[in-house]
Image (tube, helix red, strand yellow):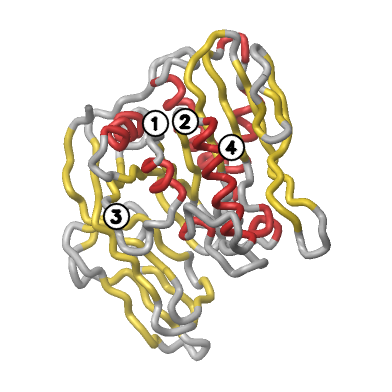
Amino acid sequence: MKTIGSAVIKRGGKTQGHIHGGTDTDGSAFNIPVLIAAGKEKGPTVWVHGCVHGEEYGGAASIIKFYQDIDPASLKGTFIGVPVVNLPSFKDRNRISPLDGANLNRIFPGNPKGTYSERLAYRLLETIKDTADYVIDLHSGGIGAKVPFYMIVKDDGSEVAEKGMWLAERMGSDVIWRSKGEAGTGGSNSAHIVKAGIPTVTVECGGGNVTEEHEEQFKIAIGGAMKALQMIPGEPSVQKEYTIINNADFIFTGEGGLFVPACDVGDILNKGDLIGSIMNLYGEVTEELHCQADNAYIAAVGHRYWPTEPGQLIAEAITVESRGGGQ
């Protein structure tokens, strides 16, 4: 009988367990929770994980809620939910790990003999490769920023990436970032899962406080994928038109202070338009941050008056490639 860590896959039922993720400085275990629902009928295995970045809580809550609502009697195939991948980061309420300072989503494929995060990346990727037919990776803007509801597909030109695009178009959003290897994103889990031949979609949604709308949008995305794969009853939502974006500009601060946004997520800006500014504690504007390209979709922006330090990622502006129907 197949297992995921300590969790046994039982046809027609639900099980729970954990993947051993290593140990803390006091020797206590980081046991990564695993939620499994398996239908009596065979079908695809969909792996859904959250909190690769530990302060992106919406994905974790939505996985738990989705799992609770699954009826194994009407399920074909297997749902594997991992609400929190990065437990040290989650416990620290931080994007990066307090153990080694690593951003987990920049160090895949990992290293079995490396630091805690490198070992975690390696273990997670190997487990997914041994288990999943499809992967859904849930993210948000974290504590300090917000993002709209959209999908990301790593486009390496492969048939696997095209399957990911097909799936993304059925997950409830009309915006898809067709990412073609932007600088600094090559070490993401999704890029290496696609390299392993597994179609993968990243879902972005919300940030800061998790609202009921954010939870519902994450659940719509998971449910849409599983409907498209004929794992659960119902038809996925296909949009009349999609906005395809790529070629991201990551906007970093040069000065510390309070961030004052001049736009909102989902806005379309042109080159030179103001994204936001940095204000010091005397109320003086010390820096203005401007859009670097025309027809750019604001895919992330920092919260109003969020304290920032020099070199902090504060916004993402991604060029609109096309608008039109899907596949």
Marks 1 and 4, the one that precedes in the sequence: 4
For residue 69, which quarter of the picture? top right
Which mark, residue 22? none
Q: CA distance from mark 1 to mark 2?
A: 7 Å
Name the amino acid type tagged 2: Ile
Q: CA distance from mark 3 to mark 1?
A: 22 Å
Type of amino acid at the residue the image marks with label 3: Gly
Q: Residue furthest front?
A: 113
On residue 220, the disc is: 2
Q: Distance from label 3 to label 2 (Cα)?
A: 27 Å
Q: Is residue 3 above or below residue 106?
A: above
Q: Badges 4 and 2: C-beta atoms under 8 Å apart?
A: no
Image x and y of residue 77, in percent: 53, 17
Earlier along the polypeptide chain: callout 3 or callout 4?
4
Q: Residue 36 at what x, y percent from top left?
A: 64, 26
Q: Depth check: give the residue in front, 61 or 27.
A: 27
Residue at the image position 23 percent from the left and 58 percent from the top? 296
Q: Nearer the viewer, residue 224 or 113?
A: 113
Label 2 neighbourhood size at 10 Å, few (<14), some (14-19), many (20+)? many
Look at mark 4 in the image and give the residue it sits on. 62
Disc 1: CA contacts within 10 A as few (<14), some (14-19) or many (>=20): many
